[in-house]
Amino acid sequence: MRHLAVIVLAFTWLSAAAADTDAGRLPLAYRTTEGAYPWTGRLFALGWQGAAGASPASYLWEAGNLLDQRPPASRRIVTSSAPTDEAPEQLVEPAAATSGNGDQSARLDWLRGAQSVSGLRPRDTALGYAAGARVRVVAPPAWAPGKPGHTAFRLRYGLRRHMAWLGTADGLLHAFDAVTGDERAAYLPRTLLPYALALPQAGAPLLPAPCPRPEAQDVTVRGEWRTVLLCGIVGSPATGNPAAVLALDVSDPEALQPFGMLWEATASDTLPISARGPIRAAGIPDTAGVRWHAVVTLARALYGRSGLLLLPLDKPAGAAWAGKYAPRLLPLPERDCADKPAMADLIAVSVLADMAGQAVAAYATDDAGQLWRFPLAGAGVAACLHSTPGQAQPPVDEAPVLLGSPTAPVVVYGRGNGLSAVPDPAQGSTPGAVPAQIAIQASDGGYILRAPAANADAAPYAGWQLTLPHPGEQVEQLESVFPGHLMFVTRTPDGVRRGYLVLAATGDSVVRDSRGQAVHMATGQVLPAGATVFVNTTPVPGGATTPGLSASEAYALSLWAADGKGATLLTQTLASRRTGRLRWREIIGPATEDKP
């Protein structure tokens, strides 16, 4: 049976505060399931049942059911036209990008959700199956000190609705209202259009989700702040589609068309992209200021060596990828961590930025278990930071998690039968230092994870490494949890999944009691079949702070597994963080509010 996708961590107390119109109404998490056919599926929004904190067991809405209540013709599905010398790339109706014969019209009706089209595949719901894809909730712009000109953008769009984006195996990228589940519009990538038109025919292969790891960020495009959604489409040998990358302007979901087109780029000799993992945004300083790029993985099969490709986000829709808009190529060096020829493919990347949002470095993992650092600001070449033993392919293209500040980052990534937290030696840690091995003890249906005891003569911090307790167990989801924790989900070859919650700095599984004392706890419990795993974070009320004195903030963290029958509490703990005498504002300083 196909597995059910783990979707999204929902920090409702944080995101709901961003827009008064959505406060208290946002779902905790989203869960996808299969439909009656391999090409159909369901999307459930999970919410609290009764008082907040009681049990997250109710579904606020289901997207497929909402789509089925609408006439198929009422749905707004658009694609993009190929740019020509006369006309730039722009959003168009799919019918305008096809020959428009009767057979294609029937197939377009099928894609809109028509459930009884003669000669075409049956369907039980208008929503496609979201195999391997995750939901991305795009919130209103948050306060961003140190980013010139962002205040006006934030004030203009500070009350816009939250949007939930999901790619499905019929080639559609859906934009749902995160509170109501209403589909505002859907985008059918130009790269997938011919394959989507073939899908309704019996026997045609399913499409890859057009955006398995959506990424959204506020960036400047030709001098204006915009919220951009970045998506990768992985090439599929079964379908025959090439890899592609697309960038949508999602700043104004209240507009008649709730997103605009920046560009869509298909893999070619000029753009040798593989588009694995999330597509990241990076603001890189140049002579004219900060210029934003999409950071994309490079296909070794097309280029001869893997690496990263930086695609300028400010490229006009009708311009070629040349001259001012030529991509910047960052290949891997010729030798890897073991001083052998670098023959691996990069699978996912994360970008480290400074307090002002400018990119410092990119960290990428490859399918040989190696971690690479690419400098983005200034000169330099990629360097191999760490290698984790194990030859098993990762179950998903999961990106590394970055912890700490830009001056002392720690990179956490899963590979093979393990999970590693590696400090960046380029930022002051000890090169070649061996991470501390986490001890494992079976307990209470899970495992106690225990880092070695520290001592006064210990070497500088070298990170930690966990060998997962079951043969073949691999990380399939890895998330940073505020404050100071990691959540990860694993899968063994027999399909059993487990959920873990640990301290990010040490790898310990601990719980803090009401007095703040740390006690080791069991984590890694077996999850119900098809469960969605998420962490709920709730601030704990504290006493008033005194100006000029340091203080702390406390948060209750609870790890849940939700399936179709209800929700199970796996782990709960109390987390805290210290604040400075002026809280965190003293770190950043006053914001400069000029034009970008």
Image (tube, rainbow, N blue to C red):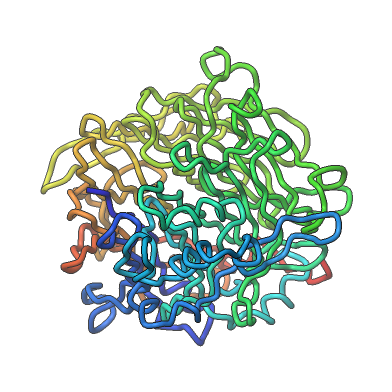
Image point (55%, 24%), residue name? 431
Tell me the quarter of the picture where residue 553 sits: bottom left
Tell me how many marks there are: 0
User: Is 129 placed above or below 138 here?
Assistant: above
Residue found farthest to the top: 340
User: Which percent across, then down, holds residue 541?
Assistant: 37, 77
In terms of depth relative to the viewer, which is nearer, 273 or 570? 273
Would you place residue 164 above or below residue 452 in this image? below
- In this rendering, does residue 409 appear at all? no
Image side of residue 547 versus residue 470, left or right? right
Q: Residue at x 60, y 71 (%)?
A: 142
Where does residue 582 sit, x and y in percent of width and height? 59, 69
Examine the rendered structure and indicate whether residue 432 appears above or below residue 139: above
- Residue at coordinates 54% horizontally, 73% vertically from top-left? 185
Residue 211 spot, x, y in % from top left: 51, 54
Indicate the quadrant containing the C terminus: top left, top right, bottom left or bottom right: bottom right
Horizontal and vertical percent for residue 446?
16, 45
Q: Relative to the observer, which residue lies in front, 212 or 285?
A: 212
Residue 344 visible within the image:
yes
Residue nearest the viewer, comparing 385 with 405: 385
Left or right of 61, for residue 384: right
Q: Residue furthest bottom?
A: 21
Q: Residue drawn 49% across and 55% down?
A: 196
